[in-house]
């Protein structure tokens, strides 16, 4: 009886190990996915504005936004996706004087490089596409030029709640050769390139 119990225990352990390996493989399976989430910006990246003695005094508020993506995972470590992000317009001030608002929308095609470690899968994301700034300035002192192209870089982690439902946490930055210029009649300055940084969280569904 004791030998039979040990044999049953050993067989059970092997079966569980096999199921775990199957589960590991299933989390990294090929297939399509869609996702939606929220973004919290850190405005225009301060490091760019610090390059100009005038524009370093611009204050660009933090804002919330939304993001959506759809993609296809070709293997355990690689996926391609399309991502769209809309950010609520930033308030822009210069020495506490309101200059208007600056909105940002971006759309990129991303290559996603994944470390397929069971339910918790870190990733690196590299993308390219377009960005559109929506500038509303009542003093006509602020201008943005040459803002068609955008690059995206991101780091994050996908956490599998089930085999289909995924919680995502990430940090992404949009970089663009756009030039931001300020001319108040008394002072002027310009900086290129500029970009934004935001924190993202959301849900995705794996088909």
Image: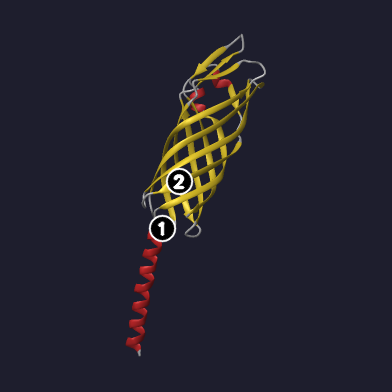
**Can you give x and y, in whole percent of width and height, for residue 62 in the image?**
60, 33
Q: Which residue is mark 2?
A: 71
Q: Residue furthest bottom?
A: 1
Q: Residue at x 34, y 83 (%)?
A: 6
**Can you give x and y, in whole percent of width and height, for residue 127 in the image?**
42, 36
Q: Is residue 53 left or right of residue 74?
A: right
Q: Earlier in the sequence, mark 1 or mark 2?
A: 2
Q: Residue at x 39, y 66 (%)?
A: 20
Q: Secondary structure at mark 1?
A: loop
Q: CA distance from mark 1 to mark 2?
A: 20 Å
Q: Which residue is mark 1?
A: 118
Given this view, does label 1 or label 2 mark the residue nearer the observer? 2
Q: Residue at x 39, y 71 (%)?
A: 16
Q: Which mark is residue 2?
A: none
Q: Height in image: 138 above or below 111?
A: above
**Can you give x and y, in whole percent of width and height, for residue 41 in the image?**
56, 36
Q: Height in image: 187 above or below 66?
A: above
Q: Is residue 10 left or right of residue 27?
A: left
Tag 1: Cα neighbours inside 10 Å, few (<14), some, or many (≥20)? Answer: some
């Amino acid at each position: 009886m004791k030998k039979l119990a040990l044999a049953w225990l050993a067989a059970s352990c092997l079966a569980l190990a096999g199921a775990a390996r199957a589960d590991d493989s299933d989390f990294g399976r090929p297939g399509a996915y869609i996702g939606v989430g929220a973004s919290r910006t850190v405005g225009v990246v301060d490091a760019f504005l610090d390059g100009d003695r005038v524009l370093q005094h611009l204050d660009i508020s933090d804002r919330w936004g939304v993001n959506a993506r759809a993609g296809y995972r070709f293997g355990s470590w690689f996926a391609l996706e399309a991502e769209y992000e809309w950010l609520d317009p930033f308030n822009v001030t210069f020495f506490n004087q309101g200059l208007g608002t600056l909105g940002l929308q971006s759309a990129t095609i991303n290559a996603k490089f994944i470390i397929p470690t069971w339910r918790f899968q870190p990733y690196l994301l590299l993308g390219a596409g377009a960005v559109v700034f929506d500038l509303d300035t009542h003093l006509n002192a602020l201008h943005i030029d040459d803002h068609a192209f955008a690059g995206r870089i991101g780091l994050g982690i996908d956490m599998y709640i089930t085999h289909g439902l995924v919680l995502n946490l990430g940090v992404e930055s949009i970089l663009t050769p756009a030039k931001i210029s300020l001319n108040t009649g008394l002072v002027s300055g310009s900086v290129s390139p500029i970009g934004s940084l935001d924190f993202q969280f959301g849900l995705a569904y794996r088909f």
